[in-house]
Image (cartoon, helix red, strand yellow):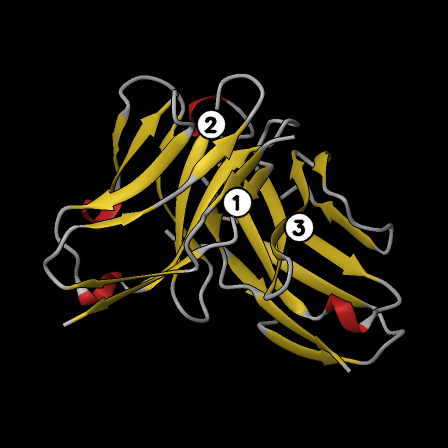
Amino acid sequence: KAGVTQTPRYLIKTRGQQVTLSCSPISGHRSVSWYQQTPGQGLQFLFEYFSETQRNKGNFPGRFSGRQFSNSRSEMNVSTLELGDSALYLCASSSGTGGVNTGELFFGEGSRLTVL
Amino acid sequence: AQSVAQPEDQVNVAEGNPLTVKCTYSVSGNPYLFWYVQYPNRGLQFLLKYITGDNLVKGSYGFEAEFNKSQTSFHLKKPSALVSDSALYFCAVRGAGGGNKLTFGTGTQLKVEL
């Protein structure tokens, strides 16, 4: 069974640009969550999607947005990039969004964004 | 708000010795607690979770964790450490919003030496 696939793995952008990151969850998983990992702030929750609906949202500015498609693939977008957006962006999938499997996440290897 | 604390930035242990990585939590209501491990340049891997039931939870790769309600702790343990266990370990708690929103600790770097 293929794992969570994130593309691109590495990218470099300049301030003011925008970026779109893609995540393909494990087959059959309908929940996709996004996390930002930085040395200073650690791991921070961005948002969760389940069946194309945003289920939860973290404390990030409106420049950070996401969506989920009918095949459960998800994208996140960051507009008007700032230096502080440099981070490892991790996508995680789960079979559900509640019940006994809640919180049991399968992470991709991440997309490392560098903003210059 | 839900939170977890990992008081140690780094833990060093000799191979073959028992290891403990500490975590304390603060939640309103029943805690949903998790341990994840991250190897260099990789995503996180789920190790184990506590939702309800036995206070001693067994997980992947020989790891276990002990839930202690009175001390609000959820320490990760392994009876005999391996060099390959060297990695970054994160404790996490499910957030108030439910679902798969997790609040992670700051992480503890485990170094197992020969």
| Residue holding disc 1 | A93
Q: Which numbered mark, 2 or 3, is in the foreground of this view?
A: 2
Res. A29 in view: no
Q: What's the residue type where badge 2 is placed?
A: Tyr
Q: Which residue is mark 3?
A: A74
Callouts 1 and 2 close, C-beta under 8 Å: no
Q: Which mark is residue B32?
A: 2
Q: Label 3: chain?
A: A
First of labels 3, 1 by sequence position? 3
- Find numbered disc 3 in the image and state the secondary structure of the residue it sits on: strand
- Give the letter of the chain under mark 1: A
In the displayed structure image, the side of residue B31 where residue A67 appears, left or right: right
Q: Residues within 10 Å of mark 1 (few under 14, many from 20)?
A: many
Residue A30, given in percent of the width and then of the height, sits at: 57, 37
Q: Amino acid at mark 1?
A: Ser
Give the residue at x 78% y 82%.
A116
What residue is shown at x 89% (from left), y 67% (from top)?
A: A80
Q: Secondary structure at mark 2?
A: loop
Binning the other alpha carbons within 10 Å of mark 3 as few (below 14), some (14 to 19) or many (20 upward) gives many
